[in-house]
Image: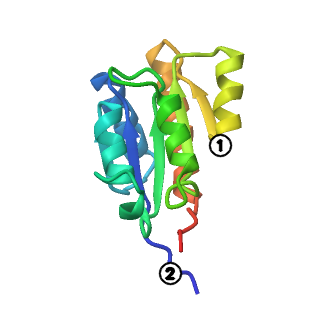
């Protein structure tokens, strides 16, 4: 009865080093899902919601969004709000991955519908460890499909 589509990981991260580290550790955890990487919010939103912004393009996609909050053109909070308020994308789990550990910002992300909030440790080892755990989380996760 399980006709789950493979989940596409949509990574929105403007720091190229962090993006490579995230991808490497997801792969190391044995997750082979397609990763679509975006370095700015505009192109990420165009992929997620389509050029018309309706979200229709994502209607039958199984996605998981990895979202940095500090992007060059907009905040990740804006993207989170748009994804979670769209009928076609709101079921997609969103993992916020950012350097900010401000309690109000964390709460705001959860209020908007973020599923997980991970503060990027500044040291490489801590960050790599957090991503490895995230990779294991992806390996066992089933993403609901929109109808």
Query: Which residue is depicted at the point 47% across and 37% down?
Result: 79
Which disc is residue 3 wearing? Answer: 2
**Count of numbered badges drawn on the protein:** 2
Whether residue 8 sits left or right of residue 80 in the image: it is: left
Label 2 element class = loop
Tell me the quarter of the image containing the N terminus: bottom right
Display coloring: rainbow
Q: Position of residue 50 (x, y in %)?
A: 32, 54
Query: Which residue is depicted at the point 50% across and 81% down?
Result: 3
Q: Position of residue 56 (x, y in %)?
A: 40, 63
Q: Choose the circle earlier in sequence order: 1 or 2.
A: 2
Say above or below: 17 vs 96: above
Q: Position of residue 31 (x, y in %)?
A: 42, 53
Q: Residues within 10 Å of mark 2 (few under 14, many from 20)?
A: few
Whether residue 46 sits left or right of residue 144 in the image: it is: left
Q: Which residue is mark 1?
A: 113
Q: Position of residue 121 (x, y in %)?
A: 53, 17
Say above or below: 66 vs 14: below
Q: Please tell me which residue lies in front, 93 or 72.
A: 72
Q: Residues within 10 Å of mark 1 (few under 14, many from 20)?
A: many
Which disc is residue 76 wearing? Answer: none
Whether residue 90 sits left or right of residue 38 in the image: it is: right
Query: Which residue is depicted at the point 46% across and 40% down?
Result: 66
From mark 1 to mark 2, how far is it between C-alphas?
26 Å
Query: Which residue is depicted at the point 41% across and 38% down?
Result: 25
Nearer to us: label 1 or label 2:
1
């Amino acid at each position: 009865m399980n006709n789950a589509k493979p989940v596409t990981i949509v990574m929105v991260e403007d720091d190229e080093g962090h993006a490579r580290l995230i991808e490497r550790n997801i792969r190391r955890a044995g997750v082979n899902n397609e990763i679509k990487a975006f370095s700015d919010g505009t192109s990420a939103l165009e992929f997620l919601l389509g050029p018309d912004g309706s979200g229709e393009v994502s209607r039958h996609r199984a996605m998981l969004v990895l979202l940095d909050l500090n992007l060059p053109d907009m905040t990740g909070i804006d993207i989170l709000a748009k994804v979670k308020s769209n009928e076609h994308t709101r079921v997609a789990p969103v993992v916020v991955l950012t350097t900010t550990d401000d309690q109000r910002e964390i709460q705001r992300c959860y209020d908007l519908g973020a599923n997980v909030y991970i503060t990027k440790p500044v040291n490489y080892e801590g960050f790599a460890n957090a991503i490895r755990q995230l990779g294991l989380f992806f390996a066992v996760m089933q993403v609901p499909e929109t109808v």
